Amino acid sequence: MKSNNFVKLLLTLVASLISFIPFYITINVAFKPMTDMSSRWLLPKELYLGNFVTAIEKANIFGAMKNSLIITLFSVLIIVFVGAMAAYPLARIRNKFNRSVLNLILAIMMVPPLSILVPLYSNLSKMGGISTYWGIIIIISTFQLPLSIFIYTNFIISIPRTIDEAAMIDGCTDFQIYYKIILPLLKPVTATVIILTGVAAWNDYQFSLFFLQDPKMRTVTLAISSFFSQSSSNLNAAAAAALMAIVPVVIIYIMLQKYFVKGMIDSAIK
Amino acid sequence: MKKFLIKGLVVMLIIVMLVGCGEDTANSSNSESAKGDGAVESKEKVELTFMINHATDLGITVAIQEAIDDFEKENKNIEVELVSGVADYEAVMKTRMGANDLPDLWATHGWSVARYSEYLRPLNDQEWANKVNSGITNVITNDDGELFVLPVDMDLSGIVYNVDVIEAAGVDVNTINTWDEFLDACQLIKDAGYTPIHMGGKDYWTVANFFDWVAPSFYITDENDNDIETLLGGDFDWNNWSEACDLMMVLDERGFLNKDKLSSTYTDSAKNLAMGKVGFEFYGNYVIGEALRYNADANLSFMPVPSDSKNDEKTLISGERNAFGVWKDTEHEEEALLLLQYLARPDVMTSIASASALPAGLKGVESDTGNLASAYAEYSSLRGFNYFDRAFLPSGMWETMESTSTGLLAGEMTVQEVCDKMKTDYLRLIQQ
Amino acid sequence: MKEIKRKKFRHNHMSTNLMYVPAILLFFLFVIYPMLTGIKISFTNWNGFSQTYKYVGFENYIAMFKDKNVWSSFSNTIIYGVGSTIFQQIAGLSTALLINSKFKGRTIGRTIIYMPVLIAAVIMGNMWYFILQYDGGALNDILILIGKEPVDWLTQGNLTVWIIVLVNTLQFYGISMVIYLAGLQGIPQMYYEAADIDGAKKLSKFFNITVPLLMPAISTSVVLNLIGGLKLFDVVKALTNGGPGYSTHSLSTLVNFTYFNNQSAGYASVIGLLLFTFIIIVSLVAQKFFKSKEVDL
């Protein structure tokens, strides 16, 4: 068994190393000044902090993290609650009509954003939603909802109907069944939904680029990209900004992971 | 679940408040100092949005911001928000044009006539309008004589080169008057162990730029034998385009181009120039500014574009670089024009043009072009020709040039196919 | 017995279906309605930013069918979609099986493997560009170190397409791993214990217990990866921008290129519709396939 564990450790190490390579290079680049053009594998001779200063002063990385946080938080709230709610009838009432509705919703996931960009921008602009929190939150939520609905629907289908029926005997309305009984059961899969859609919201670039025109509203991905233009680029500052932005995401992921695993074990025992 | 959510929300809210507070106080103290103290504003507050296509950390962005700060001190009722660091500026501008929702002022980066003019207010009535540097009057004026932007600087360049590399290879740029002599120089550079020419082909515009640079020498510059009339008139023989194509193919076949010509970028071009690995590059002098960011000691200059035959002379290329226009549907036209007038002041324009180390856009305005000053002086008697696609081709041909030139370089298109495609699009676009 | 139960405890269709109305409303407003405008654009020669354009009927559609660049991008897209999906399932399932057992370092390993997913694809793509680029790229640095010639990895045509598949896999296989981990932990231990009593071998346990019971996880992961892979955009744009020429374009990047670089919004719209239709067909087929393989507990 010991050698088995060692082999597992080794394999995990290899996989982790490969995944870590881009980060290693980013860390190197972030701590070197622009004028240092040595190989990217080499560690910096000294820890140059100028790029982090640039990222803070020129790209307003902390402000961007605040924006990303707010946008992601509220997007996830909408995606989880509207999504789970929408999944309930789609999972329980599986007639032809609802099946088409579900397929339509899945089709939303497949719309290439560029095809609808200008009409979408135009509409949102007329509604006064450009460079606002609510504008980008609604757009991001709308495009992540299909994934959430998809995952929740599959999961609710696997919850035995007897649970619903027991509640119906007690005289609950459908919404009460959903809210009081089904929703709590969705904990483990909710963590999955939060992780998947939350990350997508945090990393959104395609929508944020166009719908957040005000520099004060920029999110993390826009702040990092602000160091690239057609006629110039500052990879080092962008790397520093990217590093600073990764930290909260990794921390929250680790926090959610523990809860996610606990949730898995709980439902498995059940 | 509820407990976790509540805890999580509280934590998030605390973080948001902390970060938010920090950000807000920074903002409010900035705006207070910008407005200055004293006089009570009687006029209503006007906010202008001014978008430029440069990153936030560039010298020119800083220079423009300083000019704006001074402008705001003089005009206490106007607040200008300079928006820089826009990732994918062109895509954003195109989308906003499509939705007709544009900022009050923006930078047109070489496209004031061909792309943005539909949305810009003509500026012929401005007092600086007749002071535009003659080198670029043609390119920023449309066929009806309308002028749409204030050029704060202009691109006046030829072929950029690294002085140290040239000298190490034993090349004397003064002897390069024709393409044949240029090819000989490239051979010397290659023999000395350097890359003669670097192209950042992953950025398609760099290859198209090569054609913009060399095309005049084949079709325009010879006063006795040129195609100006046929190009403008619509009956240019596109089979002649093979001359320009052949030049690029020769450079490629003799190994004068960098090996990764199709996968490296404009940034790589600037870096290689800075690192002293490359001899020549076919860009405007703006690449020198970018290269100096990587190596402030790099010894860089430019030389005129060679001519095609001994009967002709070498020439320069000129075009619109940093130029700003006003949205024709802006709600604050008066204030926007005021800002442009402020930027047109000689001392203000000098500081901005110097930041990009390019000649100023208006006549009689100085610019500190650093090490290039002697080169500009030396070549001041040479004729300058505007960006080929903008001066002589219908609007939309730049995109065709991008795809055909990279297709040719990648070996996906033959010279004949390139000529045919250029002809097809040329005929289609010249009708519009 | 079942019939009577259903009749008595039927969900109230009307009021319960109301629960998905908010979602549907959002979709109509922000997706379906703009998409109808997008379809309208496909019949014009709009350049994407002018206020004027002309209707050209089916010209764009006909041109698309004749355009060899569209079809090469189409085949690239299939490779991006199917290739990524296959690799991600293999990588995701193997690492999930690995991490599922208890040993030191599994938590850190799980976190690091998932970390690329946490980074925006547009940024990750750029990081990989700096590894793969010819001049000064990390990979070529290693090659030079061991005395080999550097390779221009990003201009090798078909090989580059597969390299892009690899980068995409490395970026996202953490998601598959997480989905499979959840699925694995949902399989009751008693099945394995019963099989052990019967003297089943490891491989047999895997194919007869694990795989069938993982079907919901497999179908979720495959469908998600397929859709993501077929829509692949950021990685391609960052690594090759679709080039050299058109050799590595996916349909998504081709749409973007046609729209912004070629200034043919109408034509881009048609290609976008092609991509959209294709993804729908593929995902419907995939879902039907997996429905038939699902096993009831």
Image (spheres, grey):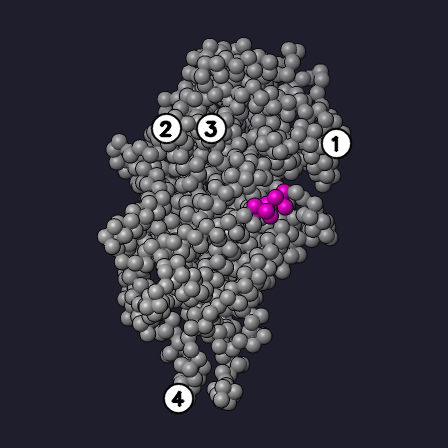
* Chain ID, mark 1: B
Asked whether the viewer can see residue B98, the reply is yes
Q: Amino acid at mark 2?
A: Ile
The residue shown at (56%, 43%) is C249
- Magenta-tinted stretch: C69-77
Residue at x 49%, y 89% (from the top left corner): C1
- Residue that label 4 marks: A170
**Badge 1: residue crowd in 10 Å (few <14, some 14–19, many ≥20):** some
Which of discs 2 and 4 lies nearer the camera? The answer is 2
Query: Cα distance, mark 2 to mark 1?
Result: 57 Å
In the displayed orientation, state which residue is furthest to the front: C199
Horizontal side of residue C232 vs B351, given as left or right: right
Reading the image, the residue beneath label 1 is: B234
Please name the residue that numbered disc 3 is placed on.
B269
3D distance between C-alphas at marks 2 and 4: 74 Å
Above or below, comparing residue B405 to residue B162 in the picture: below
For disc 2, the neighbor class at 10 Å (few under 14, some 14 to 19, many from 20) is few
Position of residue C114 in the picture relative to residue A145 (left or right)? left
**Badge 3, how many Cα within 10 Å: few under 14, some, many 20+?**
many
Q: Which residue is mark 2?
A: C146
| Of marks 2 and 3, the one in the foreground | 2
* Amino acid marked by disc 4: Asp
Labelled pair 2, 4 in contact (Cβ < 8 Å): no
SS of the residue under disc 4: loop
